[in-house]
Amino acid sequence: MSMAIALPLAGQVALVTGASRGIGAAIARELAGAGATLVVNYASSPEAAEAMVNEIQAAGGKAWAHRANVADEQQVEAMVKAVLEREGRLDVLVNNAGITRDGLLMRMKTADWQSVIDLNLTGVFLCTRAVSRSMLKARSGRIINITSVVALFGNPGQANYSAAKAGVIGLTRSTAAEFASRGITVNAVAPGFIDSDMTKDLDKEPILKAIPLGRMGQSAEVAGAVRFLAADPAAAYITGQVLQVDGGMVMR
Ligand code: NAP
């Protein structure tokens, strides 16, 4: 019996939103390591995005950066157009960009509610719609949305964020149902508490008590789940699912 050794995403193009830092950077690194050409999206950290591109290129991979605010319809459309013009294809979309604007609901400013919904939920819709035409035409594609375990339980101080992330789960399932007949899978990854800029100022003691594995997660551990969902044929028969990467925090 012969065995062919090939990188699972060789020849494919992956767009990762918010790939300049944190979990997105780890996902970019992982998918590039699997052979994909990486489009590193960022909004306000050009140096970090370029450093990511340089790191991938230095390791022998292919990558370039594109600035776009994923909450802005025109910028999202222009980004996807740029990818298709330059690469001629777009195989994997990872909707990772996200922010928090935490506060108790009673005192939450409408602007803080709206900016989290605009980026964390509407941004996923805009990017998904923008890639849909080329993926539907190609009759293949992988869309992976980064949600959060706080979409699954009530986290005080995060009404805006939990609502957006729960919305992403609904959006994932509806899109999965719409795109399934065209060979496109749509899944979500729900990280628990991961070491990144987003969590660096949180009080870790109560959080660690709630995690059966007894530690924060690492960005690379989320990236591993994304790589799996992007890989063919490993995850070809999985769609509309939420894969938790949370150290056992929420067991259902
Ligand atoms: P992070 O370290 O704060 O990084 C956020 C990333 O999003 C940065 O690359 C940032 O790029 C980008 N971004 C912010 N606003 C953007 C915009 N308008 N358009 C495009 N990109 C934008 O956050 P993280 O912890 O890696 O989180 C990544 C994802 O995982 C988010 O969706 C988050 O909700 C989710 N998540 C995180 C955790 C956790 O514990 N850390 C847990 C569950 C889920 P610039 O710097 O260039 O603006």
Image (cartoon, grey):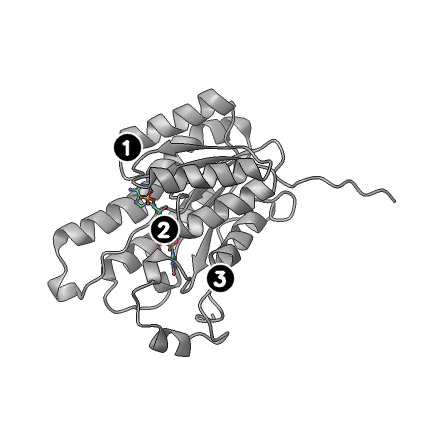
Circle 2/circle 3 CB separation < 8 Å? no
231 w.r.t. 86: above or below = below
Q: Nearer the viewer, mark 2 or mark 1?
A: 1
Residue highlighted by disc 3:
245
Q: Position of residue 153 (x, y in %)?
A: 35, 68
Label ID, residue 168: 2
Indicate the secondary structure of the residue bearing disc 3. strand
Q: Nearer the viewer, residue 205 or 84?
A: 205
Residue highlighted by disc 1:
73
Q: Position of residue 23 (x, y in %)?
A: 43, 52
The residue under label 1 is which amino acid type? Glu
Dot 2 or dot 3: first in sequence order is 2
Say whether residue 178 is visible: no
Q: Residues within 10 Å of mark 3 (few under 14, many from 20)?
A: many
Q: Position of residue 103 (x, y in %)?
A: 19, 63
Report the side of 228 relative to 17 (left or right).
Answer: right
